[in-house]
Image: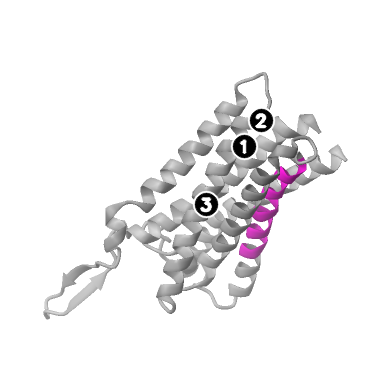
C-alpha cells in the first residue's frame, strides 16, 4: 500500500512541475515565436496565453484540464491520514474541498474570457483567489497538527502561511478596484488610443495566484511525503 502512495506522490509532483514548465516557459516561448512579441504576464490574462492560436487551443485546454486534475487529486493525499487520525476527518475534508475548488477555478481562469464574459471571469477570479487562500490556511493548520520530532511541521506551516498572506495582499490591493482604468496615448492626428497599463493589475494578480497555487500544491505534497507517508 505504501508503494502506491509513493507512486501517487511522484506522479502528482511530476505533473504539477511539468504544468508549471508548460505555462511559464514552453507556451510563452511558442507565443513569442508565433506573434513576434513577448507574452507579458504583467499585462495579459492567462486565457490570452493559450488562445492566440485556434488550431492549438483544444490541445492547450486539454493540458490545462490535465494540470488542474492532478492539482485536485494531489489534495486527496490528505485523506490517507483518516485511518491514523480519526479527529482529522473534518480537516482533511476541508483541504480536499478547497483543493478541488481551487483547481477547478484554476482551469476556468484559462477558459472564461474577460473580453467576452467579464462578470463570469471576475467571479471565477474571485472564487479562485478565495479557495486558494483557504487551501493554504487548511494546510497550515494541518501541518501544525502533525506529530513530528523535528521542526518540519512548523517550517511547512510557515511556507503555507507566507503563501496565503501573499495572496491576500494581492487580492486586497486597492489598485485592483480600479483595474479597468487604461492608459491613453494621443497620436499626431489627435486620435486617442487606450492601452493597458503596465502592470495591468488584474492580469498580474491572476498570474500570481496561478503560480502561487501551484507552489501551494507542491508544499502540500511535500508535507504529505515528509510528515504523513512515514506514518502509513
Q: Which residues are magenta?
A: 64-80
Q: CA distance from mark 3 to mark 1?
A: 15 Å
* 84 and 112: which is toward the camera: 84
Dot 3 crowding, Cα within 10 Å, few <14, some 14–19, many 20+: many
Q: Residues within 10 Å of mark 2 (few under 14, many from 20)?
A: some
The picture places residue 125, in percent across and down from the top left corner, at 45, 62
- Compute the Cα span from label 2 to label 1: 7 Å
Pointer 2 residue: 146
Q: Which mark is residue 142?
A: 1
User: Of helix, strand and loop, which one carries label 3?
Assistant: helix
**226 vs 31, nearest the viewer:** 226
In the visual, does 43 lie left or right of 150? left
Q: Position of residue 229 (x, y in %)?
A: 76, 34
221 or 85, which lies in front?
Answer: 85
The residue that appears at 74% across and 43% down in the rendered structure is: 9
At x 62%, y 37%, the residue is 142
Q: Residue furthest right?
A: 1
Q: Main secondary structure of the magenta part?
A: helix
Figure quadrant of residue 38: bottom left
Residue 60: image x %, image y %? Answer: 60, 68
Q: Is 187 part of what is drawn in magenta?
A: no
Q: Is residue 56 visible?
A: no
Residue at x-position 57% and y-position 32%: 156
Vertical side of 84 occupied by 136: above or below? below
Q: Which residue is mark 3?
A: 132
Quadrant of the snapshot with the N terminus: top right
Instruction: Give x and y (percent) for residue 119.
Output: 41, 74
Name the mark nearer the viewer: 2 or 3. Answer: 2
Amino acid at each position: 500500500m505504501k508503494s502506491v502512495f509513493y507512486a501517487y506522490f511522484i506522479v502528482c509532483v511530476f505533473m504539477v512541475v511539468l504544468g508549471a514548465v508548460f505555462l511559464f516557459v514552453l507556451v510563452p516561448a511558442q507565443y513569442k515565436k508565433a506573434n513576434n512579441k513577448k507574452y507579458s504576464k504583467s499585462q495579459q490574462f492567462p486565457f490570452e496565453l493559450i488562445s492566440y492560436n485556434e488550431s492549438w487551443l483544444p490541445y492547450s485546454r486539454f493540458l490545462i484540464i490535465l494540470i488542474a486534475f492532478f492539482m485536485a487529486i494531489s489534495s486527496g493525499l490528505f485523506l490517507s491520514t483518516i485511518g491514523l487520525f480519526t479527529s482529522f476527518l473534518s480537516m482533511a475534508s476541508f483541504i480536499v474541498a478547497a483543493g478541488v475548488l481551487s483547481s477547478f477555478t484554476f482551469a476556468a481562469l484559462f477558459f472564461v474570457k474577460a473580453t467576452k464574459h467579464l462578470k463570469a471571469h471576475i467571479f471565477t477570479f474571485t472564487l479562485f483567489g478565495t479557495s486558494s487562500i483557504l487551501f493554504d490556511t487548511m494546510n497550515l493548520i494541518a501541518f501544525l497538527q502533525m506529530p513530528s520530532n523535528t521542526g518540519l511541521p512548523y517550517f511547512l506551516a510557515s511556507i503555507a502561511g507566507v503563501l496565503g498572506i501573499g495572496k491576500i495582499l494581492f487580492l486586497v490591493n486597492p489598485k485592483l478596484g480600479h483595474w479597468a482604468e487604461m492608459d491613453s496615448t494621443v497620436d499626431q492626428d489627435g486620435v486617442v488610443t487606450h492601452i493597458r497599463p503596465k502592470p495591468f493589475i488584474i492580469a498580474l494578480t491572476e498570474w500570481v495566484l496561478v503560480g502561487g497555487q501551484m507552489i501551494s500544491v507542491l508544499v502540500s505534497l511535500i508535507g504529505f511525503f515528509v510528515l504523513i507517508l512515514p506514518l502509513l
